[in-house]
Amino acid sequence: MDEAPRLVRRRASRVNLPNLLTIGRVFAVPLVIWLIAGGELFWAFWLFTAAAITDGIDGAIARAWNQRTELGAYLDPVADKALLMSIYVTLAIIGEIPRSVAILVVFRDLVIIGAVILSWLIEKPLPIEPLKISKLNTFAQIVFAGVVLGSNGFGLDLGRVEQAGAWLVGGLTLASAGAYLAAFIRHMALDKS
C-alpha cells in the first residue's frame, strides 16, 4: 500500500535540476528572438539576463550536488550556442551590432560543431571540453549581448562601450576559433593505435 508513494519519490529524485534549467534556456531562445524582432528589447534584456543567470546556476548545482550528467554535458553548450548565435544574428539583422561580429560568432560555432561531427565520422571522437579562452569568449559574448539589449531596452547611449565590446568579442571569438582549430589539428594528428 505504501509502495506507490515510494515509487513517486524515487522518480522525483531522478529529476535533474541543472538539466531542467538548461532545457528552460533552450525554450527561452525563440521567446528572446521574438521579443528582439518585435522591438521589445527591455523584456528581451530581462529574459536574456534570466537565461544567462541559469547558465551559471545549472553548472554550480551540478558540481555542488554531484548532478553532472552526460545529457547536461552535451545540452549545456548546445543551449549556450543556440541562445548566443540566435541573439547575435537577430541583433545584427535589426542593426544593433555589427554584422561582422555576428558572422564571426556563428562561423566559430559552426566550425567547432563541424570539427566534432567530423571527428566522430572518422571514429576519432574529439573530447568535449571547453578551453579557457572559450569560457572567456562566452562570458564576453554574454556581457556584450546584455549591454546591447540593456542599453536599447533602457534607452541608454553606450555607443563607445558597445563599440569596445564589439571589438573585444570579435577578437576573443577569433582567438577562441584559433585555439579550437589548433586543438583539433593536434587531436587529428595523434596516432589512433
Image: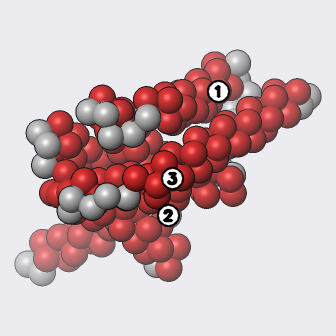
Residue at the spot 15% in from the left edge and 57% down from the top edge: 43
Measure the C-alpha gap from mark 1 to mark 2.
24 Å
The quarter of the picture where the N terminus appears is bottom left
- Which residue occupies the foreground of this view, 7 or 123? 123
Residue drawn at (37%, 58%) of the image: 158
Depth check, front residue: 35 or 119: 35
Examine the rendered structure and indicate whether residue 143 appears above or below residue 13: above
Q: In terms of sequence position, does the residue under pointer 1 or pointer 3 come before the other?
A: 1
Farthest-out residue, left: 1
Query: Which residue corresponds to the image point at 50% horizontal and 29% vertical from the top-left?
Result: 100
| Image coordinates for residue 73, horizontal then vertical, percent | 51, 52
The amino acid type found where label 3 is placed reads Gly
Can residue 142 be seen from the camera position used here?
no
Query: What SS does tag 3 mark?
Result: helix
Q: Secondary structure at mark 1?
A: helix
Question: Disc 1 vs disc 3: Cβ atoms closer than 8 Å?
Answer: no
User: Quick check: can you spot residue 85?
Assistant: yes
Residue corresponding to mark 2: 68
Residue 56 falls left or right of residue 109: left
Sequence-first disc among 1 and 2: 2
Q: Earlier in the sequence, mark 2 or mark 3?
A: 2
| Residue denoted by label 1 | 115
Label 3 Cα neighbours within 10 Å, binned few <14 / some 14-19 / many ≥20 = many
Hey, what amino acid is under mark 2? Arg
Kind of residue indicated by mark 1 = Ala
Q: Marks 1/3: CA distance?
A: 28 Å
Relative to residue 114, is residue 69 depicted above or below? below
State left or right for residue 103 relative to residue 180: left
Residue 165: numbered disc: 3
The picture quadrant where one finds residue 136 is bottom right
Q: Name the residue located 46 percent from the left edge and 58 percent from the top edge.
A: 161
The label nearer to you, 1 versus 3, is 3
